[in-house]
Amino acid sequence: MLDQLREYMLGPTRFMNVLSCFELGIIDELRRNPGSTAVELGAVVGARPDAVEQLLHLPVKDGLVAYDVETGTYLLDGLAAVGDEDLHRVLAIMNATKMVVLRQSFYLTESVRTATTVGLKTLYGHDGNLYEALEEHRDLRDAWATMMDTVTAHIDPWFFDNIDIPPGSKVLDLAGNTGLGAILAYRLTSAPNVHVTTFDLPEKQAECLMNFKAADLEQHCSFIGGDAFHAVPKGFDVVLIKHFVDMFDKNQVLTVLRNAYQALNPGGTLHILGPVYSENLEESYGADFFPTYFLGCTMGQGGPQKLSTYRRWLQSCGFSVTKAIAQDLAEMPADALVAHGILSATKFA
């Protein structure tokens, strides 16, 4: 157990050591000029040779970089085999972890006690959640959005490949933000004559309609303003909830699910997409990341659940669950932190 506790103690310092090697440009320089000394690396990246040497001890220890004792030179070891696309994805996540998670997580204990994002208040003077702060603080938005773009690129096609939207459906993208989800829903579904409505807070309307116009989808997508926790417009055949239910505690999630139930026509279907924990928590890294991420850095509440938990919650709200699947971790990149899940449920009443 002490060995395991030591790994927790060393986590933040190991993370920043390796990330700093990338940020300084040391890894890029070794890719361009393998066999460089600490003096040569320092001259290129603008750092003291002694500091470069210290930073490279850990990458050498872990096999990311190799060191030739006889010549005193460094070259890439394990990192030489990592392709540009994979490295871009990993660095996007690492940068978001630094900007969005590492700093704010210093205040995790206070955030849990107050159910607020104390780090955002302390560091940015922001009262509210991360998603609101993204509109005001470019450094947070750039780091978070770059990471989420890499997630969306492979999650949304998988989502729409695994759900059914019948021809002629009236679709509601609940909490659809500024309409990009509605645009993807229209483009990625193969069903004809589908109309997709974004439902979100009224202040999102102008940007949402602008996005529909830019995508030339004004005839196929529309916007309704409102609050998902109060009431949701009725008369829809399909309701989509993507990357939303994991942001809130149980009672609020149940409120949203009940409102989604009321929004559906009899026989209509709800499709939920979001990160999920494995039924056996030892099988994924979701529990390593998301409690700190949601409780300390983004919402002050929330966090993913197991598919079995979401199934029970849906059934308690009157739904009949027809599908509950998660991504196969064995088919995902080895650096993946979490599997996403899909739950489909029908309103029969």
Image (spheres, rainbow, N blue to C red):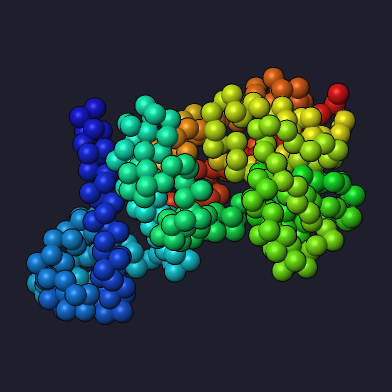
Establish if 96 lies above or below 81: above
Q: Can residue 227 be seen in this view?
A: yes
Q: Position of residue 146 (x, y in %)?
A: 49, 60
User: Taking 104 as reference, is 313 left or right?
Assistant: right
Q: In this rendered view, identify the residue nearer to me: 178 or 46.
A: 178
Q: Nearer the viewer, residue 62 or 98?
A: 98
Which residue is painted at 26% across and 61% down in the image? Answer: 20
- Residue drawn 20% across the image and 56% down it: 58
Q: Is residue 167 left or right of residue 203?
A: right
The part of the image, by quadrant, that contains residue 251 is: top right
Q: Which quadrant of the view contains residue 17? A: bottom left
Q: In this view, does 119 lie above or below 62?
A: above
- Viewed as shown, does residue 34 lie left or right of 177? left
Residue closer to the observer: 65 or 185: 185
Q: In the rendered view, does 299 fall on the left or right side of 211?
A: left
Q: Is any atom of residue 311 visible in this view?
A: no
Provide residue 253's location: percent of width, then percent of height.
Answer: 61, 29
Q: Which of 58 and 106 is in front in this view?
A: 106
Q: Residue at x 31, y 79 (%)?
A: 32
Disc count in the image?
A: 0
Query: On the rendered image, what quadrant is the C terminus found in?
Result: top right
Q: Where does the N terminus fall, quadrant-wise?
A: top left
Residue at x-position 51% and y-position 48%: 132
**Image coordinates for residue 172, horizontal then vertical, percent:** 77, 44
